[in-house]
Amino acid sequence: MHKLLVLYPEPTDRAEFVSYYERTHLPLAKQLPGLRAWRYTTDIAPQADGSPAPYFALFEAEFDDVDAFRAAMSSPEGAAVGADVPNYATGGAIVLDYETTEGALP
């Protein structure tokens, strides 16, 4: 499985971020070809010492493999998703993608 993780630092306006993200950006992201699952949160807990979390929000997406991920991101839908990020992510966005290795519990 290949995953996409997007970390969002604190935006200029939290309410505006959430409104735009839920109303406009997520509907675009849900159209990515080959997308198997997705999830997001804007409720990241403070650090163990009580200081604020370094990120305001995060988004996770799952694809079958790296080829499916690359095809999705190079598609017209992927281009639309990427082009939309500056419209709401006033604090920027950190994008990571990676192959996962399954572990087993004892």
Image: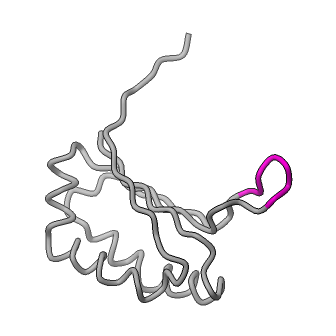
Say above or below: 4 vs 98: below
Say above or below: 84 vs 93: below
Q: Is the N terminus in the top left, top right, bottom left or bottom right quadrant?
A: top left
**Residue at the extreme right:** 50
Residue drawn 41% across and 85% down? 86
**Residue at the extreme top:** 106
Return the x and y of residue 6 as percentages of the image width and height.
Answer: 45, 62
Q: Quadrant of residue 100?
A: top left
Residue drawn 41% across and 57% down? 38
Q: Which residues are magenta?
A: 45-51
Residue drawn 14% across and 59% down? 71
- Which of these two is toward me, 76 or 56? 56
Q: Is residue 50 left or right of residue 57?
A: right
**Does 79 lie within the magenta span?**
no
Q: Is residue 22 left or right of residue 33?
A: right
Provide the major secondary structure of the magenta segment: loop
Q: Quadrant of residue 15?
A: bottom right
**Does 49 lie within the magenta span?**
yes
Residue drawn 40% across and 26% down? 102
Q: Is the C terminus in the top left, top right, bottom left or bottom right quadrant?
A: top right
Say above or below: 18 vs 54: below
Instruction: Give the colouring mode of the picture.
Output: one colour
Say above or below: 101 vs 105: below
